[in-house]
Image (spheres, rainbow, N blue to C red):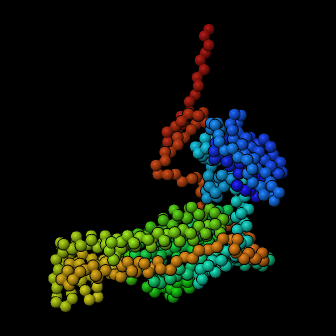
Amino acid sequence: MAFKDIPKARKFMKLYALANKKVLKLKKSGKRKVRYRCIVGCPFLCLISKDGNARVTVKTLESEHNCGIAYDNSIIDFNTIAHYFKEKLQDNPKYKVREMVLDLKRIFELNVSHGKCKRSKRMILETLDRCFAYEYNKLDSYAIELRESNSGSDVVINISKDALENGKRRFLRMYVCFKSMKMRFKLGLRPFIGVDGTFLKGKAKGQLLVVVGQDAQNHFYHLAWAVVDKERKHSWNWFLQLLQGSLDLKEGEGITFISDMQKSWCKASLDTVCKNQSVDNNFTELFNSWILEVGQKPIIKMLEDIRLKVMYIMTKHEAEASTWSNEYGPNSLELYNEFMEIAQVCKVHSNGEGGYEDSEGSDKNCINLSIKKCTYKEWDLTGIPCPHAIRALHNKGDPLTEMHRRYSKEAFLLSYRHKLQPVRGEHFWKIDPSQAMEPPELVKLAGRPKVKRDRQKDEAVKRQRQSNGKQLRKGKQPVKRTRTLLDSET
């Protein structure tokens, strides 16, 4: 085993002590060598030194231990703890010091003071803050790499005009739409677009705007996304104008749009071109729950996590088609089978030229097979023959053949034909110092600032306390009591 230098070797040995729950003693330390032993009576020995070629390697190693678990280990300093928790705090800056202490106890059976963990957390957050600002210096290079690795993709970065007037380059907003997303929307996805925005919880705050599409299995996934300073009309206009060009939407004819302000729709308001089985707008909740994982990271790490997540979801959904036992998707077949059962109680009467009158109890509907319409509107909206149409089609052949082609396996796979291409790491990027930029200014986001945290539905309300420490039930007012002094006996 080789190390870059002696300090790296010391760092490794401290991590070894943490992972193996052992107390190591540094018996000899210098610029060229270090030697570690365990407690008295334990045969463990590790000698690391620099050779004539300036390589730092392990020269002697006796790896056997006959000692027990080290519950108190002085060699585990705050730097070692910081190294262990760095990624966790990067993903969740709200990770508490108390949780760090408990995790070290649970995983390594190690007793660590609250102060040591607090110092480690502070050091990690300071390092992440510096990393956060430096990420913007590499943003232009990252955008170039995205365009080169995924040719035909749209990656747009805007700089603040006010900052440019003062001779500075300050980030304002960024838009990303990959070529594969464009092709999937054109070839196999529904003409459906959902739009949403969510707060970013990182140091600079801001908003992440996103546009999602929907495939034949009702899977939502991201078509394009943008980082902006605020969710306002101007930002949305900028985002949607870029999207209009990326997806060739023209004036939006034949496209169904839905936003997070529309939690549910009535079916009468839906476009029959979309062929959607569901009127619920649950993509907002799915998106917000997912973005919590990445919204607190520096900008490039966040954008990379989104890209990798989208790539994973695309691969996962495409693999689903191999499990289909029919030429149509499971969701559409499930609804079709429900309609088949209802069709058994329907009665139809033909007019002899493709028109049918169907009676289901006291209700009546008219069916026109030549234009694939029913007054019930379910066939028009979903593209799946409704119970009345199924009953009428039984006289003509298999009703399943009249299901819209969008639900077919062929159409589903067509929407996943184009792949996101891998992106090289920053070691290969062409970083130009002249394209460095400052992070965005901290802005006050819309909405009244929170004073109290949100409580979970099942969380018990803590009892109020009086100044004298006595507990009161919720809603009870403290009773003022007077103390009576008794006269002493005479």
Residue 478 vertical placement versus 452 (above, below): above
Quadrant the C terminus occupies: top right
The answer to which of 129 and 23 lies nearer the viewer is 23
Q: Quadrant of residue 351?
A: bottom left
Q: Nearer the viewer, residue 76 or 196?
A: 76
Q: Quadrant of the N terminus?
A: bottom right
Residue shown at 59%/63% (left/top)? 294
From where the camera sits, is residue 184 visible? yes
Q: Position of residue 38 (x, y in %)?
A: 70, 39
Residue 377 can be seen in this image: no
**Residue 303 pos. (x, y %):** 61, 70
Residue 233 screen position, x and y as percent: 58, 76
- Residue 455 as seen in the image, left or right of residue 20: left
Q: Total marks drawn?
A: 0
Q: Is residue 99 left or right of residue 32?
A: left
Residues 7 and 439: in front is 7
Is 390 above or below relative to 58?
below
Q: Quadrant of residue 385?
A: bottom left
**Residue at 36% over, 79% down:** 408
* Quarter where residue 441 is shown: bottom right
Q: Nearer the viewer, residue 51 or 300?
A: 51
Q: Is residue 74 left or right of residue 353?
A: right
Q: Does residue 460 appear left or right of residue 354 in this picture?
A: right
- Residue 252 location (% of width, % of height): 48, 85
Identify the residue shown where x is 36% and y is 71%. 324
| Residue in the picture at 17% in, 80% down | 348
Residue lying at the far top in this picture: please name it: 490
